[in-house]
Image (spheres, rainbow, N blue to C red):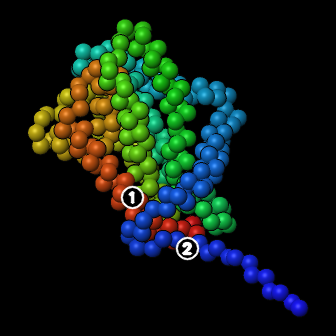
Amino acid sequence: MEFETQIPVAVYEPPRGWFPGMRWRELWEYRELLYFLTWRDIKIRYKQAALGVTWAVLQPLLTMVIFSVIFGRLAKLPSDGIPYPVFSFAALLPWQLFSGALSRAGSSLVANRNLLTKVYFPRLIIPLSAVVAGMVDFGISFIVLIGLMLFYGIIPTWAILTLPFLVLFAMLTALAVGLWLSALNVQYRDVEHAIPFIIQAWMYASPVAYSAGLIPTGFWRIVYGLNPLAGVIQGFRWALLGAEPPDMLFLVSVVMVIVLLVTGLMYFQKMEESFADVV
């Protein structure tokens, strides 16, 4: 007597429609893959690097020195009564987190094309791992900022308790923009070449070297808040240095990040079904 053995088969299909619903449970099930990809990105970045993780300190530190000479001493830009070196370095931290994550996330899908075409997993993990990997550089640079604050005698207030939320805000900003760029880069490869220019222009459009207080109140301040990095940097300087507290500019930036994140997730999920074919 023969018995037929039925082997259960799981069929995974990409979600369809513009708002299919995120598979949050599935993302949790693949958390080990997220850890592996994040750790791989960190190791590749510092592999055979002569200075290793020192680059995470040198990049913002040298930029701070240049800004301090050009904008602090020569241009004499106001710094809200805070010593300009620590004023600029506090803004360079979230900027470094954002720009690095955006650069890696934007090209992450194309860089992992072999993985995309061989095995199924939530594609969102790839740009997400690129964003999370930037926390290593952020943590190292943050120690330097603490040293600068102690050197200049700056004691943070209770506002520093909001710092974890501001860090999350910066990461969500990078993820929101990274989702758009990574999905677009699969369809249009010249997006990858445009990313460095976008990052460079974005830095000068953000209050990294100057104070957000220079932007007049009213209509133009609301327009300036459409740049989500403006709210992120304003929040960091307030939480760490006691600078200008968050106002309408910050609220507009928060709304902008939410819009970018929701629409970015929708577009990413919509295009996900064609990633393996186009990449």
**Which picture quadrant has residue 7?**
bottom right
User: Residue at (63%, 52%) from the top-left corner?
Assistant: 33
Tell me the residue at 50%/25% (across/down): 141
| Camera-nearest residue between 60 and 162 | 162
| Depicted 118 relative to depicted 64: above or below | below
Asked whether disc 1 touches disc 2, contact meaning CB atoms under 8 Å apart, the reply is no
Question: What amino acid type is highlighted by mark number 1?
Answer: Gly
Q: Which mark is residue 10?
A: none
Q: Is residue 192 left or right of residue 54?
A: left
Badge 2 crowding class, 10 Å Cα cut-off, few under 14, some 14 to 19, many 20 or more, is few
Identify the mark nearer the N-term, 1 or 2.
2
Q: Residue furthest right?
A: 1
Snapshot quadrant of residue 6: bottom right
Q: Is residue 114 left or right of residue 72?
A: right
* Quadrant for the C terminus in the image: bottom right
Query: Could you say where residue 101 lies in the image, as x and y percent from the top left?
Result: 48, 43
Q: Is residue 29 visible?
A: yes
Which residue extends farthest bottom? Answer: 1
Q: Amino acid at mark 2?
A: Glu
**SS class of the residue under badge 2?**
loop
Place of residue 236 in the rendered image (x, y in percent of width and height, measured from the top left): 34, 29
Secondary structure of the residue carrying numbered label 1? helix
Marks 1 and 2 sit apart, C-alpha to C-alpha, by 20 Å
Q: How many marks?
A: 2
The quadrant in which the N terminus is found is bottom right
> Is 30 situated above or below 216?
below
Which residue reaches farthest left? Answer: 218
Q: Say which mark, if any, is on residue 264.
A: 1
Q: Give how far across and how far down residue 275 sits, in percent.
A: 54, 68
Q: Which mark is residue 13?
A: 2
